[in-house]
Image: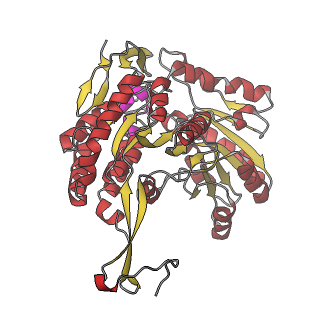
Amino acid sequence: MERISHYIGGRIVPGVSGRSGPVYDPATGQETHRVDFASQDEVRGAIATAAAAFPHWRATSLSRRADILFRVRETLHRHRQELAELITAQHGKVVSDAMGEVARGLENVEFACGVPHLLKGAYTEQASTGVDVYSIRQPLGVVAGISPFNFPAMVPMWMFANAIACGNTFVLKPSEKDPAASLRIAELLTEAGVPDGVFNVVQGDRVAVDAILADPDVQAVSFVGSTPVARALQEAATRSGKRVQALAGAKNHMVVLPDADLDMAADAAVSAGFGSAGERCMAISVVVAVGAIGDRLVAAIKERMARVRIGDGRDAGSEMGPLVTREHRDRVAGYLDSGPAQGATLVVDGREDPIARGSGFFLGVSLLDHVTPAMDCYRDEIFGPVLSVVRVQTYEEAIALVNNNPWGNGAAIFTRDGGAARQFQFDVEAGMVGVNVPIPVPVGYYSFGGWKHSLFGDTHIYGPEGIQFYTRGKVVTSRWPDPSTSTVDLGFPRTR
């Protein structure tokens, strides 16, 4: 069976730990590859390679780095179809969705191409007599990224584009569930001219993660994943003196006011709830129906759900593919039992879809109505094609529901009332807000990140905050006086 290995120092390096894991085709349920799991020594070797490459890469001019990044962007763009097909084969999302993932990742590479401008400092002449002050930002050294299974190409681009643009060297630990895209990206970066050792990939499991967190040469870690893991990773990285940005779970709400266009709202709920089989941290998982619109909104959503085409992501007619593993599919399906047992109404049961009884990891689209905050289907991040509807009477109840939830990744409102929309963006406790936009993922020149238990660490990811995360500031105060004027002065320095 074909092996998926590491990429260190500009070449594929087969694993030697003797440990590996299965990689499946989610549409068939068949194991297609084995992925090598790195030992602590193998991780240490990759980090040492990155550390050795850092001095030269840091000294590379900004114009040269920008030139390489432009070539990275063009190379990845030329191979976008290939990358999308690799994503589909191991994650399961449909090819058109995978193409969108690659395109959104490339936005971040495009942003990083402007690194000469992004790293401009400030300069003050004559801050004091004969004294000038200026600020600069410098790279950290070796930095690492630990990326999730649901976006095996886009999230690594969120991380490495800014990191290497700023002059750092990078070690990526991708998800072991769908690791092929990361390996191909590494090869394409080398083809585009990224020097050996600047971008490295170590495959693996928790052993590799722990080795990254413990290594003293790693200065910063970026992570995207579940809330418990993000919290533990942030604590471990902080104890070892590393910077960390850990983007965690979500329970994204879509508030629908009585004046909203219900057809538009229903379209948005189905699109944002079931795209990529709900395996998105920005998926809408809760629709909040305000006032008397609940029955009509649920009926409109149900009608659209019946038309969702589910199948192999490589089939051009499919709109939604399988979930990533059998275990994850079964966990998600469990909420279709616990929800009704706790008082919810099961409007559409995805287990009854004929495709859910096949050999792949499929679950049909599902809808729970009359959900309350006390139910497991509301309290947990389901991360699958299960949409919940909560009914409230007023806007105030809706905003309280959203703000009382421990997660604060994204939230959206659907309304025709500009005043209500503005009040919502003022009131809501979430890092990303949509107004008649159900998935408000920021463009590459803004930054992505949530509030509350959706983020652990000081900064959001990519965009301007990404540049801040991967660099540290330095302020230089300089003067060039006539040596004959030099004197001893024990007073505290002050402007003159």
Above or below for 127 versus 398 = below
Give the residue furthest to the front. 488
Above or below for 425 versus 327 = below
For residue 3, which quarter of the picture? top left
For residue 428, which quarter of the picture? bottom right
Which residue: 66% across, 70% down? Answer: 419
* Magenta residues (range): 86-99
Which residue: 29% across, 57% down? Answer: 113
Which residue: 35% across, 63% down? Answer: 119
Whole-percent x and y of residue 203?
38, 26
Whole-percent x and y of residue 193?
19, 44
How did the renderer colour the structure? secondary structure
Which residue: 32% across, 34% down? Answer: 48
Whole-percent x and y of residue 439?
53, 50
Above or below for 160 versus 430 = above
For residue 426, which quarter of the picture? bottom right
Q: Is residue 94 magenta?
A: yes
Query: Does any portion of residue 123 appear in the rendered image?
Result: no
Query: Does any portion of residue 175 appear in the rendered image?
Result: yes
Whole-percent x and y of residue 496?
46, 88
Q: Quadrant of the N terminus?
A: top left
Q: Nearer the viewer, residue 287 or 205?
A: 205
